[in-house]
Image (cartoon, coloured by chain):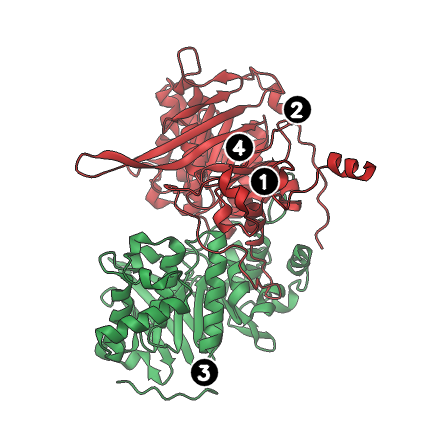
Amino acid sequence: MLDQTERSDLPLVEVEDLHVRFFDGDETVWAVNGVSFELMPGQVLCIIGESGSGKSVTMRALMRLLPSQRSVISGRIRVGQFDIMALDERQMSELRGSTVSMVFQEPMTALDPVYTLGRQIGETLMRHEGCSRRAARKRALELLQLVKVPSPERRLDSYPHELSGGLRQRALIAMALSCRPRLVLADEPTTALDASVQIQILLLLRKLQRELGMGLIFVTHDLGVAAQIADQIAVMYAGRIVELGKAADVLLHPRHPYTMGLLASIARDPLREHDIEAIPGSPPDLRVIAQGCSFAPRCKFARAACTAAIPSLRRVAGDHVAACLLIEDLPHEGAPAAVLASLA
Amino acid sequence: MVPEPVPRVAAPPPTAADDPRDRGGRAQPLLIVENLRKHFPIHGGVLGRKNASIKAVDDVSFAVLKGETMGVVGESGCGKSTLARILMGLVPQDQGAIVFDGELVGGERGLSLRELRRNMQIVFQDNDSSLNPRLPVVDSIAYGPRVHGMGRAEARTLARDLLRRVGLDPALFAFRYPHELSGGQKQRVNVARALALNPRLVILDEAVSALDKSIEAQVLNLLRQLKQTLNLTYVFISHDLNVVRCVSDRMLVMYLGQVVELGPTDEIYREPKHPYTQALLESRLAVDPRQRVEAAPLAGDPPNPVDPPSGCRFRTRCPFAEEVCAEKRPALGEASSHVAHIVACHMADPQSGHSRTAPSPQRAAAALVG
């Protein structure tokens, strides 16, 4: 068994200068380019970004769930007292599902269609805690009650196809929580759900995370979802964190032009006569290494200096950081905050 | 607080009826759907007998005025995509009539499917699978006009012109294949293809749902510009209530195959009458960590459309459900005009016997007099 002792004043997760490259034939895709962050125990970090920003890859790297033949991970990753990069495969599979567990986006493909829920939840327990089949079933029932599945006794013997999307996601959360993990990684767990069900799952995750004191890293592209659950928010663009800080700071007082653009491009007011403030262009091709700020080609504030060197994260206020050369010169507390106020 | 939206004039813009293709006149809705029904049979057993049916669209009626955007919202399984497919003639309806600009669709003397599709086109959500991977995009766009008898060179010229209209430089993009384009670019090509036959009505079935937010905003802007310059009418199907609010003049809300509320968008957002619409609107998440939702507006998932609840289909999740809701299906109120705000709920009908019915003005006046 792995040693489970922990100090609560140390960060639960420390990632330092994480790089991930993928190889596809002759081509190299620079998916994650120097990501660093920390997560304190019992905190929720949301990683926000659009498709291809490297948010999911970053999270999979924490569990070393990337194809080893076609990818290279470098940097330092520490979870609890484990140095993820130094563990061998056997230790990694010990860690996955016990200390760290994961909730995926698509509950239909993440569940095995030929086993009942009771078997699938119980399997994790039997594997990691070595309990008997009977004890695993009893604990699976408790877990289904914990995630508020109606008539849990009956659901233990249900197959995934017999459940609705919301119930499947609850079952998946039950499975992730089965070995009392200290860190849960959730990759867009509510994206495939309807709005009225999405809220239920978010509230459930938030409640369980608080009650069980777990750390949670939550990947999403939806700023509204992040606002509901995050303590900290990291905004990713082209494989880098461009802004990081407390949820309220990042969402209400964004300082990076990309974050500002994302907030402005949310369709919210009747627009029959005027355009939404869209970010022009599309994200960069990650097969090419950028020499300067990756967002500069789409940025309305960009200057010559922006394309010369990659901006590093600089402190804006307190623990709020942004990677932009022009932080001091940009309008802030301005338009996006005013727009948000009008939403209230 | 939100400033009160200025009530908009719901009358169609003057351009729509000035269209030379117009037949029915300005006041004639471009599309009328009456009592549309589609039940998909489920076969089972050794003999393949029909043993149940999915009630995907069950008695749906509405009208789309010329030049407006009609939003259609609802959760998965509510029948909104089946509705789109029926309108396009991709699946036949079991019952009900479709009237396009005053002409009945189908039947011996009605508008043929071919003529209908010249006037009505669709953009699907999955921008990848809806383009032929073996055709350069210019030929995908030219395909429709070719089928309708246009020459090869002329169709290609038209396609290049359309690419320019949707914001893609034909010199760069015309001979690219779909796999060489990003999601947003593919969706622009799909829009161009839908416009190739110069349609009057375009159905957008979750057309921006798969796109990233920054790209979604670009495509929404494009759709608005095209609508103005090309004199289009849209049926905009989406599950995203923020986007629907943004683009549509009127909207209808579907639940398990039925319309539960229909009316001008601003009015529905200001004063939703159906408990389901209210819950949907409350399910929108504010981008402000200070305004967190503390209780879910609805419990559970939508029920299975194979065996919908009796009476009002929403009653199993409705906080105000009473006996009458199980016994009687609430009718969508009679529309006094095409633009009225109507709702299918017993609470809105003073005669229903529901304890929470709003007293009608007449009854309230009578009580005062008495």
Residue farthest left in this picture = B46
Q: Residues within 10 Å of mark 1 (few under 14, many from 20)?
A: many
> Is label 1 in a helix, a strand or a loop?
helix
Cα–Cα gap, marks 2 and 4? 16 Å
Q: Earlier in the sequence, mark 2 or mark 4?
A: 2
- Mark 3 lies on residue: A11
The chain shown in red is which? B
> Amino acid under label 3?
Pro
Pick the front one: B248 or A293: B248
Residue neighbourhood size for the residue with mark 4, other residues' Cα within 10 Å, grouped as few (<14), some (14–19), many (≥20): many
Say which residue label 4 marks: B234
Q: How many angstroms separate mark 2 from mark 3 (CA)?
A: 64 Å
* Residue type highlighted by circle 2: Pro
Q: How many marks on residues?
A: 4
Q: Residues within 10 Å of mark 2 (few under 14, many from 20)?
A: few
Depth check, front residue: B80 or B361: B361
Tag 4: amino acid: Tyr
- What's the mark number on residue B14? 2
Quarter of the image where one finds residue A290: bottom left
Give left or right: position of A217 versus B364.
left
Q: Which residue is mark 1?
A: B346
In primary-sequence order, the first of circles 1 and 2 is 2
Evaluate if marks 4 and 3 touch, with contact meaning CB atoms under 8 Å apart.
Answer: no
Q: Residues within 10 Å of mark 3 (few under 14, many from 20)?
A: many
> Of the numbered discs in the image, which one, if any, rests on residue B354?
none
Gap in Å between the C-alphas at discs 4 and 3? 52 Å
The vertical placement of B216 against A290, above or below, is above
Badge 3 marks a residue whose secondary structure is loop
Q: Quadrant of residue B205?
A: top left
**Image mark 3: chain:** A
Location of residue B152 by image quarter: top left
